[in-house]
Amino acid sequence: MSQITEIAPDIFKITTFISEVNIQFNQFLVKDEEPLLYHTGMKGLFPTVNEAVARLIDPTTLRWIGFSHFEADECGALREWQRFAPDATAICSFVSKMVSVDDVVAERPARALEDGEILVTGKFRFKFLQTPHVPHAWDAGHLFEENSGTLLCSDLFHQNGEVEAVTNSDIVSRFKEMLIEYQEGPFANYLPYTTKTEKILGRLAGLKPKTIAPMHGSTYVGDGESAILDLAQAMKDVLS
Ligand SMILES: [Fe+2]
Ligand SMILES: [Fe+2]
């Protein structure tokens, strides 16, 4: 059974720990007039995530399904969700929609968001930022909820292990440990460090998030700007 934690008012984190890979997979359910799920998790997680969402809302009323990039843990269960929730529309970058999502995992065409576009779901305002190759993949993007200052940051700040749901302590050192560990095994070069990485991370830091919500590991509540700048340095140290 997944663990549910409210990380900001009406923003819920759904966590499932998979011991074989020593990773938590987090999805985020936003309770609003138009409910939004960020990350579907893999196809195999659909029953578990669906049961967790049902503890929070009527899951058939889901309106939006967001994710950063085309990958199984980001949007693998999109079709399952869209068959279950008749009004659920995927939101992603234009590249994601055109290159993979509509063809491979979508039951209905996705809505492509432009860089800087705002999606209002009721009381929440989600700003879309196009962030190619950050955390990874050409089609990558991020959603930032402006009213609560919550950055849904996908694989950035990835921490391995069965860690606490929310923390005020530093998570960058755990992220750096993961990068170093992965560089020595089959998951080497998980995240690229390109000529644009620093600039894109600087833009995310400029949002001054209060809550940083990664897909893998603890949510961080605190000075998000400093945390992202520290993360940029950690990526530079290990990957460049
Ligand atoms: Fe990813
Ligand atoms: Fe991921």
Image (tube, rainbow, N blue to C red):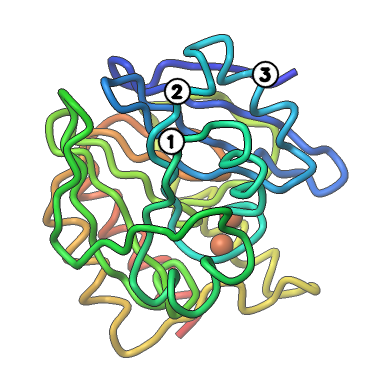
Q: Is residue 233 above or below residue 20?
A: below
Image mark for residue 61:
2
Give the foreground label among 1 and 3. 1
Rendered-image quadrant of the N terminus:
top right
Q: Earlier in the sequence, mark 1 or mark 3?
A: 3
Where does residue 236 sit, x and y in percent of width and height?
A: 40, 76
For the residues bearing labels 1 and 2, Cβ distance under 8 angstroms: yes
Where does residue 28 sit, x and y in percent of width and height?
A: 46, 32
Of the pair 141 and 95, the residue shown nearer to us: 95
Query: Marks 1/3: CA distance?
Result: 18 Å
Callout 2: CB less than 8 Å from ligand 2: no
- Determine whether, in the image, residue 162 is placed left or right of residue 120: right
Q: Residue at x 57, y 44 (%)?
A: 216
- Determine whether, in the image, residue 114 is placed left or right of residue 132: left
Where does residue 234 sit, x and y in percent of width and height?
A: 42, 66
Residue type at mark 1: give it.
Asp
Q: How many tags in the picture? A: 3
- Determine whether, in the image, residue 3 is placed left or right of residue 145: right
Mark 2 residue element: helix
Mark 3 residue element: helix
Q: Earlier in the sequence, mark 2 or mark 3?
A: 3
Which residue is denoted by mark 3 in the rendering? Answer: 51
Residue type at mark 3: give it.
Glu
Query: Marks 1/2: CA distance?
Result: 7 Å
Packing grade of label 3 (10 A; few <14, some 14-19, many >=20) is few
Packing grade of label 1 (10 A; few <14, some 14-19, many >=20) is some
